[in-house]
Image: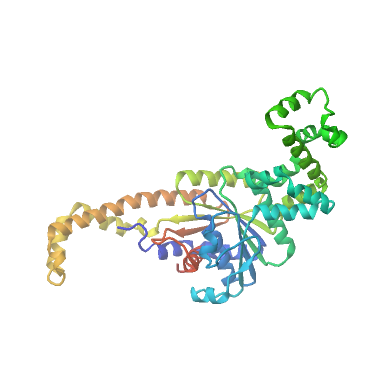
């Protein structure tokens, strides 16, 4: 027996009470940040939430994904999505059976392009900007540092919100093992550019420019001697030049980082945590929920993805499963007498009995898991106020129709 059979209607009914709550939450906010561990279906849930908002609330809704995988573009029926937001055509939505009251837009963070734009915006002049853009270290930092990805994601969110183009921005954050990195990215970036290590590294170059690269004080001399031998003087020069140029933008970066941090705490911003009820992702979700509480961020919703249907908890189902496993021969004989003439396959009582035992045993096994899930849901209720459920579907969600099914479950409609 498939655990997902009839999951849609059962889960939708059970989540109906949270549906209106989610709609009210989206109506009251301008930014919803979806977070969670990798593999819990966060991108699909975020996109489905944006799609549901377009259908129920109207307006102009943007879903921004930070995940470099292109699942969002594929699911939305777009050839490609990049830094520049693209609208999902109305005829594409209509062909998927989606009745949209507003516009759905999508964008995917391009880390390198976003960093370049940031440098051009904050550099004191074009010469400084292009010295930074041409620096080898800059390319390495923007291409490889995970934390720079976290920060630039927040920057991009701030920029989009400030543009005022969208009524609602739904952001799909990257999978991260340490959610604190993401939340603290703006503050950490500001601290880094004003930090003692950076000042110490660039001291010889700040003292005398390029000629000052050999004006080294007693404390830093050993470091530079070793670094010169290992890394080469050109590398050190690149580092110093990069950070000296970057420090010219410190004031702009610092001010911007504070603005980004303030936006994350703004009453117009809320967070939604997506998780399955498996032990590892649930533990990570609870940890992240505690981090949000500690940081005084607004946690608006908890989305439990891929849950089992409530039909697995029914007493009638349990009695039937017990009869199938305990009295399979007698049930098979009754079936053979009742419909054996019309359905010859049922006339084979031994075979029918084996099938009945398998069905009954499967129901009992999945019922145990469903009971555990129900206990966990009770524990999670009330923090936050909106707890939405999405059932486990038989099919993989790969297109707009699938996202619409998730959306109906999220908002408590028939999925």
Determine whether 87 is above or below 234 in the image: below
- Please give the count of numbered marks on the rendered protein: 0
Going 81% across and 51% down the picture, which residue do you hit?
Answer: 123
User: Nearest the camera: 328 or 402?
Assistant: 402
Q: Taking 144 as reference, is 225 left or right?
A: right
Quadrant placement of the N terminus: bottom left
Q: Is residue 369 left or right of residue 346?
A: right
Q: Where does the image place residue 349, in percent across and percent down from the top left? A: 13, 60
Identify whether 27 is placed above or below 199. Answer: below
Tell me, yes or no, if residue 184 can be seen here: no
Give the percent coordinates (x, y) of residue 15: 48, 61
> At 71% from the left edge and 52% from the top edge, which residue is drawn?
115
Residue extending farthest to the right is 208
Q: Does residue 32 appear in this view?
A: yes
Q: Is residue 274 above or below residue 53?
A: above
Residue at 21%, 57% (x, y): give it. 355
Which color scheme does this rendered protein use? Answer: rainbow
The quadrant in which the C terminus is found is bottom left
């Amino acid at each position: 027996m498939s655990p997902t059979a009839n999951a849609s209607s059962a889960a939708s009914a059970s989540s109906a009470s949270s549906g209106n709550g989610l709609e009210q939450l989206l109506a009251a906010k301008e930014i919803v940040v979806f977070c969670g561990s990798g593999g819990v279906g966060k991108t699909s849930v975020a996109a489905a939430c944006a799609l549901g908002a377009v259908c129920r609330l109207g307006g102009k809704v943007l879903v921004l994904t930070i995940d470099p995988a292109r699942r969002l573009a594929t699911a939305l029926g777009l050839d490609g999505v990049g830094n520049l937001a693209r609208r999902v055509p109305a005829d594409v939505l209509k062909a998927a059976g989606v009745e949209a009251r507003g516009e759905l837009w999508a964008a995917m963070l391009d880390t390198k392009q976003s960093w370049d734009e940031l440098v051009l915006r904050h550099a004191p002049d074009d010469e400084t900007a292009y010295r930074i853009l041409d620096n080898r270290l800059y390319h390495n930092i923007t291409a490889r540092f995970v934390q720079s990805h976290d920060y630039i994601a927040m920057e991009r969110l701030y920029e989009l919100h400030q543009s005022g183009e969208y009524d609602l921005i739904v952001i799909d954050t990257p999978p991260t093992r340490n959610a604190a990195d993401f939340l603290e990215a703006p503050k950490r970036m500001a601290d880094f550019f004003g930090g003692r290590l950076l000042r110490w590294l660039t001291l010889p170059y700040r003292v005398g420019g390029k000629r000052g690269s050999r004006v080294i004080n007693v404390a830093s001399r050993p470091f530079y001697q070793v670094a010169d031998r290992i890394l080469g003087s050109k590398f050190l020069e690149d580092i110093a030049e990069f950070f000296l140029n970057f420090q010219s933008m410190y004031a702009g970066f610092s001010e911007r980082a504070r603005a980004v941090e303030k936006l994350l705490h703004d009453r117009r911003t809320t967070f939604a945590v997506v998780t399955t009820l498996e032990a590892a992702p649930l533990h990570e979700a609870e940890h992240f929920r505690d981090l949000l509480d500690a940081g005084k961020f607004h946690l608006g919703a908890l989305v439990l993805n891929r849950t089992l249907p409530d039909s697995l908890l029914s007493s009638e189902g349990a009695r039937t499963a017990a009869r199938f496993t305990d009295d399979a021969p007698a049930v098979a004989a009754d079936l053979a007498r009742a419909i054996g003439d019309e359905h010859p396959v049922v006339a084979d009582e031994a075979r029918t009995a084996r099938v009945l035992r398998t069905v009954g045993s499967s129901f009992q096994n999945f019922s145990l898991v469903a009971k555990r899930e129900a206990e966990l849901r009770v524990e999670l209720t009330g923090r936050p106020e909106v707890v939405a459920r999405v059932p486990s579907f038989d099919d993989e969600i790969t297109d707009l129709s699938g996202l619409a099914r998730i959306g109906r479950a999220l908002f408590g409609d028939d999925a």
